[in-house]
Image (cartoon, rainbow, N blue to C red):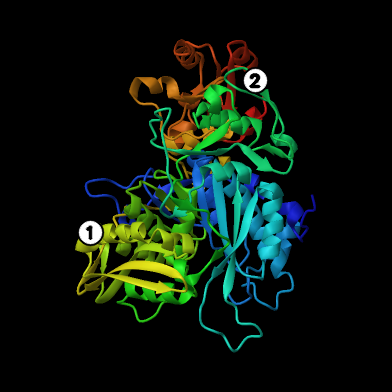
Amino acid sequence: MPTLEFKGKSFVYTHHLSVPFRELVIDAKKSLPARGQKPSLEDNLIIHGDSIHALKALLPVYAGKVDCVFIDPPYNTGNEGWCYKDDVRSPLMREWVKKAAPVDKEDLERHDKWLCMFYPRVRLLYELLSETGALWMTLDDNEVHRARGVLDEVFGEECCVGQLAWQKRTSRENRTTLSPSFDHILLYSKCLPDTWKLFRNLLDAEGETTSNPDNDSRGPWKSIPFSAQGYRKAQDYKIVTPTGKVLQPPKGRCWGATEPEFKKLLADKRIYWPKEGDGRPRVKSWDTNGLVPETLWMASEVGDTEASKKELMEIFSDREALDFHAPKPPALVQRAIGISTKADSVVLDSFAGTGTTAHAVMLANKKDGGRRKFILVEMEDYADSLTAERVRRVSKGYSFKGKKTEELFRESLTYRRLENSDKLLDHIHSIENLEGHRFDSIEKKVAAGVLIVSGEKLVTEKVDGLNGPFTFATLGPEMTLDKLLAGGLPTFEALAKYVFFTATGRTLSELPKAKAAAAGFIGETDLYRVHLFYKPEKKWLQSNDAALAEKLVDEMLATNTDKKKLLVFAAAKFMSQRELSQRGVDFCQLPYAIHRILGD
């Protein structure tokens, strides 16, 4: 596969691995917890700090758990004033970027610097995505072709779902050579697109029928063939039906997913076998009454930058101006969320800007009663005054006087749809009956062949809040030996999640409680039990009490009923590694020796 080369690539290729872990530190004063609750890192998050450090800090808890990444990085137009200042451990790189000056059009290496910024962050975003997760990224013509080269390399070019066009403005710009009307949206899935298709949602529509012949607890479903056009070696294998028949893919096609992905679908009871178990496999889908998303997203459907700037000014009506160019409309992000998430998904935006993604998540949850969680990362100084403040106002409600419109239904008027006009009108009447009490009026209009039903309400004091509590966090000291000795000590919980993830590659959502945590036990895998002997006290760490001794090892072994190998993290030890190895214990000195376990 062709690869994209750029200045500095050899130095940033593994930069995401060398970035030290840092603790997420809660700022209670800037947080907005739910009533009666305290700020918690388990809640929605807004993180103030450099995205590469924030993403690394999220790995111990969220690796493989994010279903939707939506990012709006600097477009690198030469007018944005962003700086490249990653601390890459290379004298050549440090000399190259020693002046963290804004990257402008006069910088002949601005594209190389943008790629050096982008590459390691995408590598971390890839690790955070779930196996069926997707990354959405907005860009214009300045970097879109280079971004595709990087994404092809990180995800695999076969995982490019598509390149979409979003109509970002409807007015004509007469000062330019060509009036820019659209931005690109790059969409990549972590699994193959044919597999992602089985998990993504369709756009709202009416008219499909479903059934539930096997009494699936998830409700009525439809089924689609488990095959795809073309040939892919990884999707060419034998499948055995419940009746014992051995099947190959249909002629000229391949199976709809790789064999490991098929086994996951089978274990999740998403495979339906026709002909009483003797037919070709089909995949059950609950994406009913929907339309396949198109690659052209019009402003009339998902908003434009002019309307989104107007909405942002309404939220901040007490300010005369906002120094922020072209914020994304919530409806745009909400559509991406609607396509690629479930009711309990995690949505991540590591270039948060004005906080549009959090706004969109709250709107999506209000629409379907979901419990989606948002995580925002913003490195600029306005992380609190703009990003988090917008989320506070949208969550609690904000002062506003004027007419507010909420779209309730949208449908393209095809001839087939007009043939079923009675059913369409019945659906509109049901919307009026169900939603009418929330608005002063329900408006119906047809524009460009599209029927739009909206609720309109005159607001005289305040827009109702969407209820989106969050915790505001900053980045603590680096978890390195030098920092630990200098007194920048992480909490036990933060260090436990860090060492567990780094040693096992798995996340640790919460620590064992009470007796289960005896002798510093923090978690286990199929092969290991992991212990952490640590207190966030400098004097204690430098004393003999912090060293691993025979008595403590005996306590750990006493709880090891499954006779697994022990990984023990401590500041020092009073036993030789040979003696520990004989007892099935691997000692790891905090914090560097953690990497020694990888690959064992």
User: Where, by quadrant of the figure, is residue 237 drawn?
Assistant: top right
Q: Residue at x 45, y 77 (%)?
A: 306
Spatial distance from mark 2 to mark 1, Cα to Cα?
53 Å
- Circles 2, 1 touching at the beta carbon (< 8 Å): no
| Vertical order, 214 against 176 (above or below) | above
Residue 253 in the figure: left or right of residue 423 = right
* In front of the other: 317 or 433: 433
User: SS at mark 1?
Assistant: helix
Residue beneath disc 1 = 433
Query: Residue 365: x and y, percent?
Result: 35, 52
Three-letter amino acid code of the residue under disc 1? Asn
Query: Residue 363: x and y, percent?
Result: 36, 58
The label shown at residue 245 is 2
The local crowd at label 1, few if under 14, some if 14 to 19, many if 20 or more residues have their Cα within 10 Å, is: few
Q: Residue furthest bottom?
A: 175
Three-letter amino acid code of the residue under disc 2? Lys
* In front of the other: 154 or 559: 154
Residue 158 in the figure: left or right of residue 47 = right
The label shown at residue 259 is none
